[in-house]
Image: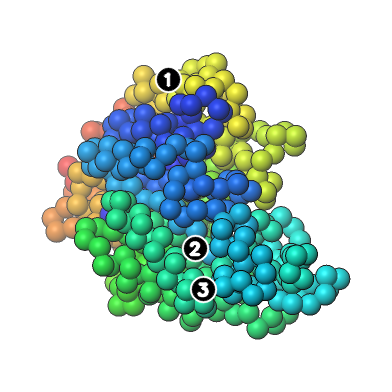
Amino acid sequence: MDAVVYQIYPRSLRDTSGDGVGDLGGVRRQLDHLAWLGVDALWLSPIFPSPMADHGYDVADYCDVDPVFGTLEELDLLVAEAHERGLKLLLDWVPNHSSDAHPWFVAARSSRDDPKRDWYLWVEGSPDQAPNDWKAAFPPGPAWTWDEGTGAWYYHRYTPQQPDLNWNNPEVEAAMHDTLRFWLDRGVDGFRMDVVHQIGKDMSLVSNPDTAVDGPSDPERNHELVRGIRTVIDAYEGDRVAVGEAYILDVAQVARYVDPAARELHLSFNFLPLWFPWTAADWRKHLDEVLRVYGDLGAWPTWVLGSHDIPRIRTRLGRDDAARSAAVLLLTLRGTVFLYAGDELGLQDAVVPPELVQDPAAFRDGCRAPIPWEPGPDHGWTSATPWLPWPPEADERNAAVLRDDPASILYLVRRTLAARKASPALREGAMALLPEGTGAGATDVVAWERTAGDDRRVVVVSFVAEPRGWDAPEGSGWVVEVSSATEEREGKPFDGLLESHEAVVLRPG
Ligand code: NOJ
């Protein structure tokens, strides 16, 4: 639960087969590097057979590996090799929708009488008139597609190639539970569950032009279905984990999914920090709310600053010092941390010209650019021309070059991970915001204390480019354990000053 999970977008990690697309061989090759970095677990975005209309989030077989990534045997090897290094492995389960190429949907659309017909969501009518005004999340357009063969509309929250499954049919629920068991039996440690807050639906077709944002969800039914999923996971030994992508921008509603008393998800992403501005006031307000709401429930939060669905943190913040500070902030909060592959290198989004766009939602290719491991021309990939262009400055911002530079963001992430691992307070301790200072500019800084028994750490983050002063709590003779600005401050007494966008971890002297 106190883990740091490294999110891998397998197409972009590393190619070992020469086809321009990353693969399981590439993940296996990076295991030593990831163990060196100090993360605890890996989450692979979908690796299942797929026509790739949404790059794997359109699953054609929940119980196999797409040949572009490798084989089932290779996945087994990856699980074993990860475990040998003490790394857990999570897969990305996509319960809300399958691919239209999944045999279930092929059967369902073959005839109105097919036994699988009711596994998806159909509405009969006329081809000129969609059942209502519901919109898909992407691409822009209706959430309904007319099926010529059987003369009916089917519902899809995402692209027409991703028909939604009908979880109100107990056969669907049972079949999807079996897909979880398939992987749990093979030893995977758990799942990230794609848009798992949308599987319980209200299909009464009430007009709602905002469905592109909300989907036609039925929250109570959804919670019930998630409890069913948890029962499957709980039947297995070991620390198996269910991480929900409950993409709801409301702290209390997300927290309800991880209320320990309800036995639903173990963890659920909190995406709000991806959307509010990088200011002390916004962070203070958000941290205050999370600590209160999760504290009341006795629940465990999560933290995310990057993923394959949003421009990278370095691109969003637009400056290196702030991206370094963000890394220290992320890794010192109370909760499970999700670190998006490449953010430890301080990568920026690639610039993707219109003719090379791959993403059905059109805006997510930049953060999915291939990761450069070495200087050019192929950056450690077997192929020189990967499926998307390289991110900027790939000759300088790559793992090999940054591993030679103790001042790099890569070392900063590694040092912060080591500090987290070594301190029960940072790993699993309580967290309390420290009061705002009173001097000029004090409101540009947020500080919090982590405690576990006698172990204490204080984290101080400045959100502005000008230097700021900050008075540490008296009595401890605080020493800088980690500084996002320069490793030269580390091991020395804290002088009460923060450089531009600096974050520090302090330990009692
Ligand atoms: C959320 C995933 O993170 C995103 O990449 C995907 O397009 C949608 N769910 C649909 O599966």
Q: Residues within 10 Å of mark 3 (few under 14, many from 20)?
A: many
In the image, what residue occupies the spot 33% across and 47% down?
89
Callout 2: helix, strand or loop?
loop
Residue visible at 26% across and 41% down in the picture: 80
Q: Quadrant of the N terminus?
A: bottom left
Residue bearing mark 2 = 95
> Along the horizontal axis of the image, is 283 left or right of 208?
left
Quick one: SS at disc 1? helix
Seen at 42% across and 39% down, the residue is 71
Choose the circle earlier in sequence order: 3 or 2: 2
Q: Residue type at mark 2?
A: Pro
Image coords of residue 295 (percent x, y): 32, 71
Total count of labels: 3
Instruction: Kindly identify which residue carries mark 1.
Output: 401
Q: Which mark is residue 167?
A: 3
Check contact, mark 3 vs mark 1: CB within 8 A: no
Q: Earlier in the sequence, mark 3 or mark 1?
A: 3
